[in-house]
Image: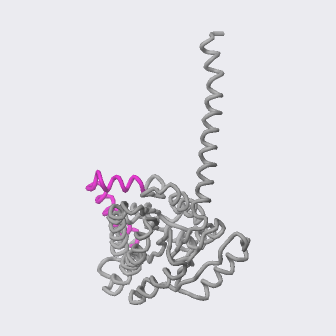
Amino acid sequence: MDPVWTTTVLLVPLVVVLTAGVFFLYSAVIGLLSKTSVRNKVVVITDALSGLGKECAGVFHKGGSRLILCGKSWEKLEELADDLANASDPTVTFPPKLVLLDFGDMDSMPEVIEEILECYGCLDILILNSSMKFKAPVQNVSLEMDKLLMDNNYFGPTTLAKGVLPSMISRRTGHLLLINSIQGKLAVPFRATYAASKHAVQAFFDSLRAEVEEYGISVSTINHTFISPSSSESTEAASSKSIWSLLYTKKPLGVSPDEAATEIVKTLSNKRKEVVIAPSLPKVAIYARSFFPNVFFAVMAAGVNNAAASEKM
């Protein structure tokens, strides 16, 4: 047998095994760093009562974080705190602190920010998870709804971020992490105000990132498609026949809460500035919007026309 051929046959399996070993060790190290990156950290989670919020609360609580959980219902926050306590070892975890927070009530924000800062005197990580969704033709959306969406998706998160920034700047450390929709990158029909609020908050944190880098503060944004869709929503999406609805379909383009929480912990560990959690089609749409805008707009318009035609049939 040719010596060269023999050497190749022997080397290929060896290279494959070594490569697999390197990837395994890399994954193990990243996993270990992710777990230790949140231990003893003061972590604020807004909308902790949502599916993703509860998942993050569980992950960070077991990881030894000093949690500050925010939500609109005190009773449900207490239930969440009890569930976390019952599912963990109290000798290695901290009982979470609870704060009522409703971004729809902007007048209460000064008191909320003060209460959050008083919990531990400082904070290390702020996870802005809150979001309000709405779907309707532009002409059917009232000014009141426009303002409510902007309060929940833009003014609320940015006001809270500005409120805790002085504490982070004085300590020259901190991490702001925005959980944002993929609509912060592109917009589809019938979600104009929602997309506008997501674009606005994306721009805010993109600008803020550059401003606070000199203080050692990290700013990350995570843009996802959907998290934890309900069966009713999935049925509604499946019945849609429009082209652009493929960008907004709950399944299989959605992301489970545990997958999103894992990505959040990784992002906090490696301090990535921007993460997009989406399958290929939405990512292609983002690039098409930037490099081939006329094509993108034509597809969006065709999708609306197809949807209108389907409703008439």
State the image coordinates of residue 179 (x, y, percent, origin top left). 46, 67
* In this picture, residue 82 sits left or right of residue 288: right
- Picture quadrant of residue 229: bottom right
Q: Which residues are magenta?
A: 282-311
Front one among 50 and 250? 50
Looking at the image, what colour scheme do you see? one colour
Residue furthest to the front = 170
Residue 271 pos. (x, y %): 47, 57
Q: Residue at x 47, y 63 (%)?
A: 225
**Residue 290 included in the magenta stretch of the image:** yes
From the viewer's perspective, tell me whether residue 134 is left or right of residue 44: left
Q: Quadrant of residue 272?
A: bottom left
Q: Quadrant of the C terminus?
A: bottom left
The image quadrant where one finds the N terminus is top right
**x, y percent for residue 29:** 61, 49
> Main SS type for the magenta part?
helix
As displayed, is residue 142 above or below residue 265?
Answer: below
Q: Nearer the viewer, residue 241 or 161?
A: 161
Q: Is residue 305 visible?
A: no
Between 191 and 116, the residue placed more toward the observer is: 116
Name the foreground residue: 272 vs 183: 272
Query: Residue at horizontal 54%, vertical 59%?
Result: 263
Q: How many marks?
A: 0
Res. 194 image quadrant: bottom left
- Above or below, 117 against 217 in this view is below
| Farthest residue, direction left | 294
**Residue drawn at x 63%, y 23% as measured from the top left:** 11
- Can I make out residue 28 in this image? yes
Q: Residue at x 65, y 74 (%)?
A: 94
Residue 226 coordinates in the image, percent (x, y):
50, 66
Look at the image and say whether residue 151 sits in the magenta stretch. no
